[in-house]
Image (tube, helix red, strand yellow):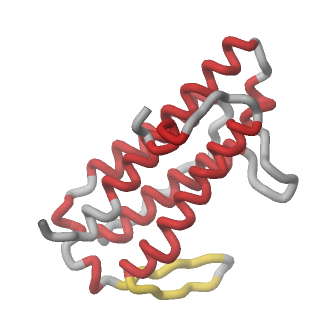
């Protein structure tokens, strides 16, 4: 079986996003069952200088859709970060899954020879697409997934490894 850029990106992002979807569903149920203020959990963070749960989810979805688009050689879609509820976050994750799964696998052909241009804080840098995937996109994707999971776990949502992995 041939290893392709599509195979090492899209299924990985989809599994992670499905895990995130399940974790968010458990968090919403936790809030509902205990009659908690959802705002407290949505704005929770592990440490004062870290992003809250809402932003962690937004960034995780951005890395999944952005990396997939860059590898496929298509324009990266910009999404407004307007989510304010568990339902909003769940819809964003579902939209990211649909977008990533909807990319044509053939568009990923040749990704190993593509250059990805990234602009951050007004500075543009260029990277080999697969180096970008493995050294930047995937680590950041998993960092924000794990941080969202940790915020929820720290705040009492009953979660396990299988929830994180999307296999629960």
If the image is split into quadrants, where does the N terminus sit? Answer: bottom left
- Residue at image position (67%, 42%) is 54
Q: Image check: 41 left or right of 140?
A: right
Please tell me which residue is depicted at 55% across the width and 53% down the height of the picture: 60
Residue sitting at x 73%, y 29%: 156
User: Which residue is most to the right?
Assistant: 48
Most foreground residue, 73 or 20:
20
- Residue 5: name its quadrant: bottom left
The spot of residue 57 in percent (x, y) is 60, 46
Find residue 49 and report its horizontal and vertical position in percent: 84, 59
As drawn, the residue found furthest toward the front would be 161
Q: Quadrant of the C terminus?
A: top left
Which residue is nearer to you in this view: 107 or 22? 22
- Above or below — where is 50 with respect to 38? below
Quarter residue 18 falls in: top left
Q: Position of residue 70 (x, y in %)?
A: 38, 70
Q: Is residue 7 above or below residue 90?
A: below
Question: Does the rendering let one see residue 92?
Answer: no
Q: Residue at x 51, y 51 (%)?
A: 61
Residue 134: % across, % down: 44, 74
Instruction: Describe residue 31's horizontal placement relative to residue 127 as left or right.
Output: right
Whether residue 68 sits left or right of residue 26 in the image: it is: left
User: How many numbered markers are drawn?
Assistant: 0
In this rendering, does residue 118 appear at all? yes
Is 95 situated left or right of 41 in this image?
left
Front residue of 142/64: it is: 142
């Amino acid at each position: 079986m041939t290893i392709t850029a599509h195979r090492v990106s899209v299924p990985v992002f989809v599994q992670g996003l499905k895990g995130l979807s399940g974790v968010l569903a458990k968090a919403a149920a936790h809030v509902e069952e205990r009659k908690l203020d959802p705002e407290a959990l949505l704005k929770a963070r592990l440490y004062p200088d870290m992003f809250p749960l809402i932003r962690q989810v937004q960034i995780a979805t951005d890395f999944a859709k952005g990396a997939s688009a860059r590898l496929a050689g298509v324009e990266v879609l910009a999404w407004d970060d307007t989510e304010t509820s568990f339902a909003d976050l769940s819809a964003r994750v579902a939209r990211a899954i649909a977008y990533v799964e909807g990319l044509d696998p053939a568009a990923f052909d040749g990704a190993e020879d593509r250059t990805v241009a990234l602009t951050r804080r007004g500075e543009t840098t260029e990277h080999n697409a697969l180096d970008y995937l493995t050294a930047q996109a995937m680590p950041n994707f998993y960092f924000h997934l794990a941080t969202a999971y940790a915020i929820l776990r720290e705040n009492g949502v009953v979660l396990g490894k299988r929830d994180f992995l999307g296999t629960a």
